[in-house]
Image (spheres, rainbow, N blue to C red):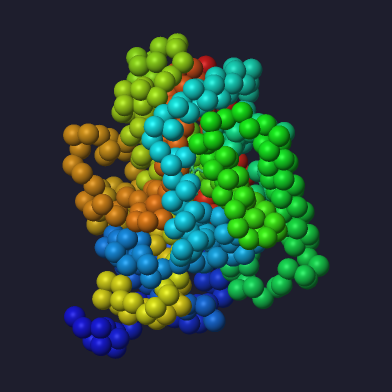
Amino acid sequence: MSVAAHGRRTFPGPPPWATPGLLRKLWGDRLGLLSDAADRYGDVVRFSMGPKTLYFFNHPDHARHVLTDNAANYHKGLGLAEARRRILGDGLLTSEGETWRGQRRVISPAFRRERIAGFAGVVADAGAQLTERLEAQAGNVVDVAEEMTALTMDVLGRTLLDADLSPLSFLGPAFEAAQEQAMFEMVTLGALPLWMPLPRHRRFRAAKRQIEDAVRTLVESRRHDTGTDGSDLMSVLLRVSESGQDADARWRGLRDQIVTMLLAGHETTASTLSWAWYLLSRHPRAAERLRAEAIAVLGDRTPEYSDLVKLPYTTMVIQETMRLYPAVWGLPRVALAADEIGGYPVPAGADIMISPYTLHRHRDFWDEPDQFRPERFAADAPPVGHRYAYIPFGAGPRVCVGSHLGMLEATLIAAMVARRFRFEFAGPTDPVPEAMLSLRIRGGLPVRVRRA
Ligand code: HEM
């Protein structure tokens, strides 16, 4: 069908008078907003919200078009644009164009599979410390989401940043405040400028200061101690920051990269592991199978990188967790020039949303999409109906640079913990997903720790 023919077609979507309700949902229930719209209107939805229009495309072909085939026409959008302005700056996640291309070229080697394989020892060590902490808590209720955050932060520090991040436990809440602000600005469309003396603005400014101070400390301590071979991420970032521009710009460049790595490198894996523990607490047979595999493969010994391929069921549990609760639930983009997606015309400047969360539950591509069934990812199961119906790490040029590290960490930690413990969900009601930049669990995940 021609563009002109579609141009006359009106987009499906809620009527303009629904705007207040839509904005409320954009603030309080982003997943509900998208899921309900997909159920009601199908694969293409236009949300008109006052001055803002959001185009939601929910067919895997649309995802391929935006993320890969015509990726050059799209920059990062809604939510990420605010996060860029407020906290991430021109780090790898939010930079664009030539700046991004240059950064990706120099940063990627630090994430190669061979390098990541060398990190298995650090992951195993962090896992051993975690199991000791859990042992001390056997029979008690702990917030396992908080434990996962501490663990992934520790691993990130010791692998990529060559630093002990344990004195920086305030970073978790500080990142939370920073993301809150970015989301708030997204929903209020920037109507409440940061100079206004609101408590949330004060909270944000304090959080930003804490994050900057932490980065400064990391950089200073590293400059005095360069005992590495120079190919780790921190060395690469420091080297890059030594060339060109004025001192201020160099510092900003370095800060943006480190803040980005701190945020992107720990929340996502922590979220994945937390949701996995919740799902396993609700599916004891799957939990038992995972435990049996972990014991058969690892026994009592320290896991190694080569164990990854021997843990297919554990891997399937992580894959299925990322299907139901993809840590990066939304891939917002802005169209640079007018385009046509799935036959629908979108104007230049249009805000586009591709959502792994809704694609991963798309009824045309998944059997019983809301059920937790790790078997769908078994080697002998039918392949996923469409390559872009499952994109937990994104796709195309902006695909996750840390996916190998994320998978290594999630799989080894799941096996190490499951061979010793099981968790009973101890919350008063089912956990509520909170769609910030990553998919958190609102209020944490209380579980009772039981020796398995
Ligand atoms: C289970 C764990 C993880 C998941 C599910 C995940 C998911 C994603 C997704 C979906 C994207 C694409 C975002 C977009 O297109 O807008 C992304 C990008 C990115 N991720 Fe991850 N990630 C994980 C772990 C990590 C780790 C461990 C790091 C390490 C620092 C990391 C660093 C990054 C960076 C820097 C980008 C931006 C890449 C670019 O634009 O060139 N991620 N991640």
Nearer to us in this view, 158 or 271: 158
Q: Is residue 266 visible?
A: no
Q: Residue at x 18, y 34 (%)?
A: 380
Nearer to us in this view, 362 or 225: 225
Q: Is residue 391 visible?
A: yes
Nearer to us in this view, 260 or 249: 249
Q: Quadrant of residue 161?
A: top right
Residue 411 shown left or right of residue 169 in the figure:
left
Nearer to us in this view, 168 or 51: 168
Tell which residue pokes out farthest to the front in this image: 244
Place of residue 301 in the rendered image (x, y in percent of width and height, measured from the top left): 44, 12
Height in image: 357 above or below 78?
Answer: above
Residue 358 shown left or right of residue 237 in the figure:
left
Q: Residue at x 26, y 39 (%)?
A: 376
Place of residue 72 in the rendered image (x, y in percent of width and height, measured from the top left): 37, 67
What is the number of callouts on the image?
0
Residue 219 shown left or right of residue 23 in the figure:
right
Height in image: 430 above or below 128?
Answer: below
Q: Residue at x 35, y 22 (%)?
A: 306
Place of residue 387 in the rendered image (x, y in percent of width and height, measured from the top left): 26, 52
Q: Quadrant of residue 46?
A: bottom left
Q: Quadrant of residue 185?
A: bottom right
The quarter of the image holding the N terminus is bottom left
Q: Residue at x 21, y 51 (%)?
A: 385
Height in image: 11 above or below 40?
Answer: below
Place of residue 175 in the rendered image (x, y in percent of width and height, measured from the top left): 65, 49
Tell which residue pokes out farthest to the right in this image: 197
